[in-house]
Image (spheres, rainbow, N blue to C red):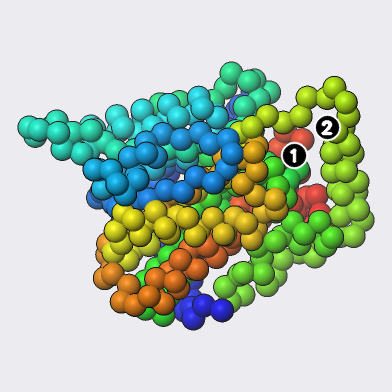
């Protein structure tokens, strides 16, 4: 058990000073998609870890500790599968207009560094051709706030699905005994299930800080039985000979973990790597051939380097727990849409 003091004031990514989060949500008729942008107020050190079998990413090679560029200007999480990578173009335009970017020569000659990762939600709003683009990236930048973060069926989580339930965007934070803040923002869109199939409870809820998840509505046994039967029928349909099953990359959980500690690019890469344990504790199975699970980790440098080896371990463990808690918040905040029930609607007495 980590030695933790209370969660941050917003219990979200913006508890890291200097970070803003903006969403663009497309849920008009024919649409169910969107994008989310994380905007630091100054360039930040960042790393990335890609674990899923069908990722869709942009500029992740740049974050390899062996490569030159050691700061980024924004991170994009988007729906739209590979089409959604174009959202980063709009974010780059926004940043360039503000004079932000990697210096390439004379004043004004800059290139904004904007890594991106996408999830699959094509067709969930009814029209396969609808996906976020550059204008949505600019809109998300314009909507970015320093908290609180809107959660649920918004931004990159608008069309998300997780194990037959409506997925979404969630966020969580915690302050360590050292005073370092750690936080995560996750768009959960997974082949695996976020619930215990026997009880219907959200898998990550046991990791709640203080009373965070102490007052969840109880799972209704009848609703759980009906949901399990529907899931079994769907699996049986996919298993029939000649039936076309899901293709690689048709799910994917993406997210950002962040800290105000001072970390190197290599330490950020390791932080992103260990943070994937948080997905594994909140979704089962995880990192499948049909998921492109990708996590970024950024450090703002507002606090000193962790002073000892166990401090680093505490930081990594807290990041993983924040990812799990963020996934729970995503499921709790999600609203039913396009025939996809939320956890509350499908399984609880509140439904």
Whether residue 122 sits left or right of residue 99 in the image: it is right
- Location of residue 242 in the rendering, given as x and y in whole percent from the top left corner: 85, 22
Q: Residue at x 49, y 68 (%)?
A: 318
Residue marked by disc 2: 238
> Which image quadrant for residue 29?
top right
Q: CA distance from mark 2 to mark 1?
A: 18 Å
Residue marked by disc 1: 340
Q: In front of the other: label 2 or label 1?
A: 2
Position above or below: 289 against 295 = above
The reply to whether residue 194 is in sight is yes
Q: Residue at x 43, y 69 (%)?
A: 315
Residue 290: which numbered mark, if any? none
Position above or below: 5 against 39 = below
Q: Residue at x 70, y 61 (%)?
A: 203
- Residue lying at the far front of the rendered structure: 66
Q: Around disc 1, counting alpha carbons within 10 Å, would you say few (fewer than 14), some (14 to 19), or many (20 or more)?
A: some
- Location of residue 130 in the rendering, given as x and y in whole percent from the top left corner: 57, 22
Q: Nearer the viewer, residue 247 or 318?
A: 247
Q: Residue at x 47, y 79 (%)?
A: 5
- The residue tagged with tag 1: helix, strand or loop? loop
- Residue lying at the far left of the rendered structure: 106
Q: Nearer the viewer, residue 137 or 188?
A: 188
């Amino acid at each position: 058990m980590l030695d933790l003091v209370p969660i941050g004031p917003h219990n979200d990514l913006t508890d890291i000073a200097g970070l803003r989060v903006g969403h663009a949500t497309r849920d008009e008729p024919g649409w169910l998609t969107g994008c989310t942008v994380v905007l630091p107020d100054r360039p930040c050190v960042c790393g990335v870890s890609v674990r899923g079998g069908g990722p869709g990413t942009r500029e992740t090679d740049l974050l390899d500790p062996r490569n030159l560029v050691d700061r980024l200007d924004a991170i994009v999480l988007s729906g739209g599968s590979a089409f959604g990578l174009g959202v980063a173009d709009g974010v780059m335009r926004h940043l360039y207009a503000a004079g932000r970017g990697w210096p390439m020569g004379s004043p004004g000659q800059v290139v904004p560094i904007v890594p991106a990762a996408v999830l699959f939600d094509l067709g969930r709003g009814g029209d396969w051709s609808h996906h976020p683009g550059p204008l949505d990236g600019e809109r998300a930048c314009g909507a970015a706030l320093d908290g609180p973060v809107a959660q649920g069926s918004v931004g990159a989580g608008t069309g998300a699905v997780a194990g037959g339930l409506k997925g979404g965007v969630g966020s969580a934070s915690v302050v360590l005994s050292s005073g370092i803040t750690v936080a995560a923002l996750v768009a959960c869109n997974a082949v695996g299930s976020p619930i215990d199939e026997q009880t219907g409870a959200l898998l990550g809820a046991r990791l709640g800080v203080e009373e965070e998840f102490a007052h969840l509505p109880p799972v209704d046994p009848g609703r759980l039985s009906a949901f399990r039967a529907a899931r079994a029928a769907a699996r049986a349909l996919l298993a029939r000979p000649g039936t076309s099953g899901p293709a690689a990359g048709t799910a994917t959980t993406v997210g950002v973990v962040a800290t105000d500690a001072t970390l190197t690019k290599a330490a950020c890469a390791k932080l992103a790597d260990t943070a994937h344990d948080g997905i594994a504790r909140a979704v089962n199975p995880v990192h499948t051939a049909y998921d492109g699970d990708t996590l970024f980790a950024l450090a703002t440098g507002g606090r000193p380097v962790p002073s000892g080896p166990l401090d680093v371990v505490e930081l990594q463990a807290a990041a993983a727990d924040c990812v799990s808690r963020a996934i729970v918040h995503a499921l709790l905040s999600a609203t039913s849409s396009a025939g996809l029930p939320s956890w509350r609607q499908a399984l609880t007495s509140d439904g």
